[in-house]
Amino acid sequence: MRLRNKPWADDFMRDNGHIVVQEPFQYRGKWQSAFNKEQPIHLEIGSGKGQFIAGMGKQHPEVNFIGVERVKSVIVGALKKVIDSEAANVRLLNEDAQDLRDLFQSNEVDHIYLNFSDPWPKSRHEKRRLTYPAFLDQYKDVLKQEGEITLKTDNRGFFEYSVASFSKYGMIIEELSLDLHDLNDPLNVETEYEEKFSEKGQPIYRCKARFQE
């Protein structure tokens, strides 16, 4: 799908520099200073249009949330949602972070969310999947020892690959759900994709895993 260019996006992000961090790499190791309060940091990789991170920010004022989204025309939609939510504990990064270790110091993040990541179904693209071992190396470095990864997807193949990847890496699987909405989890905040697929009766898969100490 081709995304429409939004010529006003740069000005909009600059005008809201208290939410969209302008020079994020300079905050490596000192992300707490980007927030009003020093609280656990939760990171969403690929925030899309922002329904999840804006909702989580509002639901959990005791947590500081950072959302990374590389597509400028998409992140401005997330920015609008964060503004509307009035959540003061959410920051957005318009970056294509090839290595999270460039943005975050070791043990700086408490939780990572992978929501409806591109499944890259072809075998030759396996290294691009966000649960490929090279990415897990990054997550392990930036997460605190007790830190956790939560993955949600509608793609059964990607889900099975990810669970296997977590297991082979020696991670502890703390939750495995083949139909998230069957759990009726009152704390689950839906993404735009999740809402869309659920309405069509598509099961949503969720896995929570953590690295062993």
Image (spheres, grey):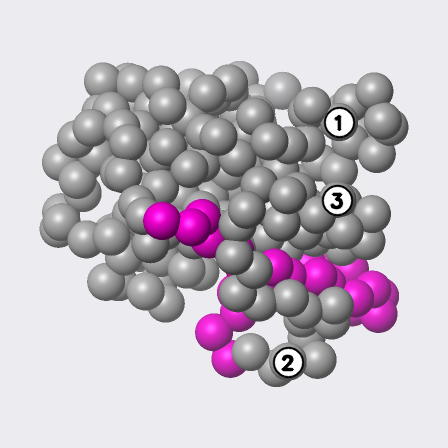
Q: Nearer the viewer, residue 113 or 51?
A: 113
In this rendering, position of residue 98 left or right of residue 117: left
According to the image, label 2 marks what residue? 183
Q: Is 113 or 190 nearer to us in this picture?
A: 113
Alpha carbons under labels 3 and 1: distance apart: 10 Å
Q: Is residue 190 magenta?
A: yes
Residue depicted at x 35% and y 41%: 143
Residue type, mark 1 in image: Glu
Give the Cα distance between marks 3 and 2. Answer: 22 Å
User: On the image, numbered disc 3 is attached to which residue?
Assistant: 161
Q: Earlier in the sequence, mark 3 or mark 1?
A: 1
Displayed quadrant of residue 178: bottom right
SS label for mark 3: helix
Please tell me which residue is depicted at 45% across the width and 29% down the height of the picture. 138
> x%, y% of residue 150?
52, 55
Count of marks overlaid on the render: 3
For the record, the magenta segment spans 186-213
Label 1 secondary element: helix
Mark 3 / mark 2, whichever is N-terminal: 3
Residue carrying label 1: 126
- Element at label 2: loop
Examine the rendering and report whether any part of residue 43 can be seen.
yes
| Front label number (2 vs 1) | 1
Of labels 2 and 1, earlier in sequence is 1
Rendered position, 171 above or below 138: below
Mark 1 and mark 2 in contact (Cβ < 8 Å)?
Answer: no
Q: Is residue 30 left or right of residue 52?
A: left
The type of residue carrying mark 3 is Tyr
- Local crowd size for mark 2, using a 10 Å CA cut-off: few (<14), some (14–19), many (≥20): few
Question: Gap in Å between the C-alphas at discs 2 and 1?
Answer: 30 Å
Specify the amino acid type for callout 2.
Answer: Leu
